[in-house]
Image: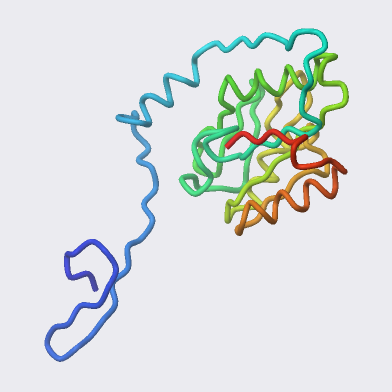
Amino acid sequence: RDGGGGGSGQQHGGGQTWKTTRAKTRRPRQPPSGRGARTAMLMDEVCLLSAPKEGTEVPKLIVFDLDDTIWYPELYMMCGAPWSRDERGRVTDAGGEELRIYPAARESLRLILTHGAFADTRVAVASRTTQGRWAREAMALLTVVGTTTLREAAGDLCEIFPGSKKQHFEKLRAKAGVAYHEILFFD
C-alpha cells in the first residue's frame, strides 16, 4: 500500500506497518517529449565519419556499451522477447516497439569493420544490463553493415551481465589478448 510519498520506505497507520516500493515505469508508448524527442530526432540524423589519416595508431579493441550507446530505447524500457525483424530490417520487441541503432554508432561500426586502418581492430560489447538474454537476441537481429549483425561483429567478445565494468574489461582484455592502453570504450 502506498502512502502517497512516491518513494520507498515504511508507512505506519492504524497499528500496521507496511513497506512501500517504487515500481519501474515503462516509457509511455506515445510521441516522445523532452529527452525522448531529442533522441527520436537523432535517430533520423545522417552521420558520416572520416577514416583516420594513414599511419594513425588505432586501438586494438573498441568496446561499446549497448543501452543508450549502440541502441535506443534501453532494454529495461521495452517489453522484450520475442524479438522480430521485419522485411525492412526493423527489430521490434513483443509489444511492437522498435529497437534502433544510433546513426553515429552504426557509422562507427561500419568504419571499424570495413576500413583498412582497422584491419587489426576487434569490436566488443560490455553491458551491465539485467536483460542479457534479450540483449544477445536483439544483437543477433540488428544489422550494422550489410548483412553483418551486431552479434557477428562482436563475436565472442561480449560481456553482458550486471556488475562491475571492471569485470567486463578484465574478461575482454584476456579474451582479446590486448593491454588496457590498446582499448577504446564508448559508453
Q: Which residue is the extreme one toward the left?
A: 14
Q: Nearer the viewer, residue 141 or 104?
A: 104
Q: Which of 151 and 124 is in front in this view?
A: 124
Taking the image as shown, residue 155 lies to the left or right of residue 139, namely right
Q: Is the residue 33 above or below the residue 114 in the image?
A: below
Q: Is the residue 127 above or below the residue 2 in the image?
A: above
Image position, residue 60 (x, y; %): 81, 31
Taking the image as shown, residue 99 lies to the left or right of residue 85, namely left
Place residue 183 in its image quadrant: top right
Q: Is the residue 53 above or below the residue 163 in the image?
A: above
Quarter containing the C terminus: top right
Image position, residue 171 (x, y; %): 78, 52
Taking the image as shown, residue 92 lies to the left or right of residue 119, namely left
- According to the image, what is the colour scheme of the structure? rainbow
Residue located 38% across and 31% down the image? 36
Image position, residue 62 (x, y; %): 73, 32
Quarter containing the N terminus: bottom left
Number of numbered tags placed on the structure image: 0
Residue located 55% across and 11% down the image? 46
Place residue 28 in its image quadrant: top left
Image position, residue 111 (x, y; %): 73, 17
Taking the image as shown, residue 76 lies to the left or right of residue 70, namely left
Residue located 78% across and 47% down the image? 172
Residue located 65% across and 36% down the image? 185
